[in-house]
Image (spheres, grey):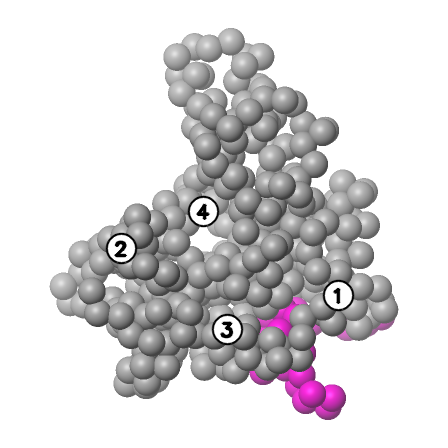
Amino acid sequence: MPMMTFPEALEDAQRYKKRHLLLGNGFSIACRPDIFLYGKLYENADFSKLSPTAKFAFEALATQDFERVIKALRDAQKILLAYGASSPLTDTLKNDADALRELLVQTIAASHPAWPGEITEQEYKNCREFIANFNNIYTFNYDLLLYWAQMHTEEGEAPNSDDGFRKQEDNYDAGYVVWEPSQSHEQNMYFLHGALHVFDTGTEIQKYTWVNTGVRLVDQIRDALSKDFFPLFVSEGTSDEKLERIRHNDYLAKAYRSFSEITGALFIYGHSLAENDEHYLKRIEKGKVSCVYVGIYGDPNRDSNKQIISRANKLISGRAPSRPLQVLFFDATTARVWN
């Protein structure tokens, strides 16, 4: 299979007016594998407050992927209900799935780098050069690394990204900023499944900030979690469940619509094209982009990469003949996102 380098893919994409980026967990892993690998999150998770069965589910599936276990538990609950199983068992499955979702949030927040200074200047420079190649940036990641990189500018230099959040005119000194549909026309950075620093209060979408409080973002997030106040986080097990959550939140729905309307070229970096994100893969199939460049990490003949390549190629057959789609592959290591 032909494999471009990232610079070659970027050069090829110059034939399109617009170039967009979709990031998966590999973006964060490339920066701090000791934190963001699934296995590391599992090792750092405190299962002590959950039922013993929640951890047994990981062992039964021989995985350390939280979202895979959450999906399996919810699927099992639905099947048992269809078979008329007793409510104590189905309730336990539901409660374990919900508890694992919260534990995932807590684990990422607890092990997250404490402040932007833990990322080196060279890492920020490399990352900003990478993301500067794209008009819009979409990420599935919940952590703060992309936000930190975008905000890490020279003194007096404005960020070249816009996440749509603004200060409130009637509450200008608040310790947070808010997102409103009417103020998001210039937005070009989207957290597709929410983020640690974004909270849905029910009446508004808030983003915690350091500049308004002088308190580190991670400390604000951990404080909120200690009070059982959870960030906007789409970690439901199945693609359909995720889409249902997205459609019922203004901020997430705007990101979904934006992604559906992009044209030109789309680069995918650090994402496995997994089934639980099928709701976004379908938007590529039904959408308007002309070419998708998919990053492959490691040996293309590895089973996990074969699955990515196979799903990427299926994007082509999902397109209407009147809007053909081209899919190309690049070596993800040559992007040198962080180093």
Classify 247 as above or below 15. above
Classify 262 as above or below 25. below
Residue 54 spot, x, y in % from top left:
59, 27
* Point 84% across, 64% down: residue: 215
Q: Distance from label 1 to label 2 (Cα)?
A: 38 Å
Q: Nearer the viewer, mark 1 or mark 2?
A: 2
305 left or right, relative to 2:
right
Mark earlier in primary sequence (1, 3) = 1
Mark earlier in primary sequence (3, 4) = 4
Amino acid type, residue under disc 4 in the picture: Leu
Residue beneath label 2, please?
301
- The numbered disc on residue 147 is none
Residue 175 spot, x, y in % from top left:
82, 64
36 left or right, relative to 155:
left
In the rendered image, the quadrant that contains the C terminus is bottom right
Question: Which segment did they paint magenta?
Answer: 147-173
Q: Residues within 10 Å of mark 2 (few under 14, many from 20)?
A: few
Mark earlier in primary sequence (1, 4) = 1
Residue beneath label 3, please?
337
Kindly state the secondary structure of the residue where label 2 is placed.
loop
Kindly state the secondary structure of the residue where label 1 is placed.
loop
Depth order, front residue of 153/29: 29
- The numbered disc on residue 243 is 4
- The numbered disc on residue 115 is 1
* Point 32% across, 85% down: residue: 11
Mark earlier in primary sequence (1, 2) = 1
Q: Distance from label 1 to label 4 (Cα)?
A: 32 Å
Depth order, front residue of 50/322: 50
Q: Is residue 299 magenta?
A: no
Q: Distance from label 2 to label 3 (Cα)?
A: 23 Å
